[in-house]
Image (cartoon, rainbow, N blue to C red):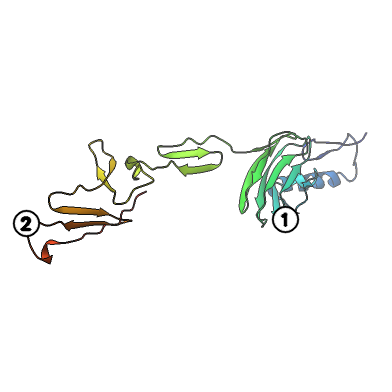
Amino acid sequence: MTSTFTPNKNIEKPAYNSYVDDWNTPVNADWDIIDRGFGGTHTVSLTNTNVTLTQDQCQNVHILLTGVLTGNVTVNFPSGVSGFYIVDNVTTGAFTVTLASAGAGPLAVTAVQDANTFIWSDGTDVYLADNAPVTAGTGIAISGTTIALQTPVTAANGGTGSTTYSNGQLLIGNTAGGLTKANLTAGSNITITNGDGTITIASSGGGGSGPGNAFAVSYIVVGI
């Protein structure tokens, strides 16, 4: 009888009465495969050509991607072989590495540069191994793998609630607990000039004489 092999890591299962005097041969080889499954590394050098990994290469839990990318590439894991992998993408070059399955399933994962991506391949598709949903908190927006502040940031979250301002506008607290954009209102014998990042307040005459009655105040308005 001949040996059989496991479908994913290709571990040999000797047939009965085989390897009678050299049983250590399959046992030692199998333990080497198991060891690689927990801590082995296979290095793949990439440029602009797609690569399909072999079953033996995928006995390693750590797939190290190196090289200078000159185009987008896909790294295919073998069809029909299941397993989880830590893919370490240390490539350079402004291109994308996609992790897919040679089983031609529609699901794939992007291997982010300078990061480790934990994936699971079921022999048909490739998934993020840890893709539990992340719930956005107040003032936070989540789109795919991007987490960002919702804009404009509200006053309740430390922002201003506005993104644009006109010349001379100030942020004034209101009874609702927020901020309102407003311009200063000139009183009697006062002129207000709203400039680009400045407010000039001056006397317009009446009630005094001489240059001592004229003054100017400039404010720089900064908002989030």
Residue at 90 percent across and 44 percent down: it is 21
Residue 7 x %, y % = 80, 35
Amino acid type for the residue under numbered disc 2? Gly
Report the amino acid beneath label 1: Thr
Mark 2 or mark 1: which is in front?
2
Say the numbered circle drawn on residue 78. Answer: none
Name the secondary structure under disc 2: loop
Contact check, label 2 and label 1, Cβ < 8 Å = no
Q: Position of residue 52 (x, y in %)?
A: 79, 45
Q: Residue at x 18, y 58 (%)?
A: 202
- Element type at marker 1? loop
Point 81% across, 40% down: residue: 10
Work out which residue is located at the far right of the displayed protein and give it.
1
Q: Which residue is the extreme one toward the bottom?
A: 211
**Frontmost residue, 91 versus 16:** 91
Residue corresponding to mark 2: 207
Query: Where residue 122 appears, x then y in whole percent?
Result: 72, 34
Counting residues from the start of the chain, the first of labels 2 and 1 encountered is: 1
Quadrant of the image containing the N terminus: top right
Q: Residue at x 25, y 35 (%)?
A: 176
Q: Give the number of marks.
A: 2
Q: Compared with residue 36, is residue 66 higher up or lower down, i.e. above or below? A: below
Distance (Cα) linking label 2 and label 1: 76 Å
Please determine whether, in this image, residue 26 is positioned above or below residue 198: above
* Residue 41, x across and y down, in percent: 72, 52
How crowded pointer 1 is (Cα within 10 Å; few <14, some 14-19, many 20+) is rated as some
The residue beneath circle 1 is 70
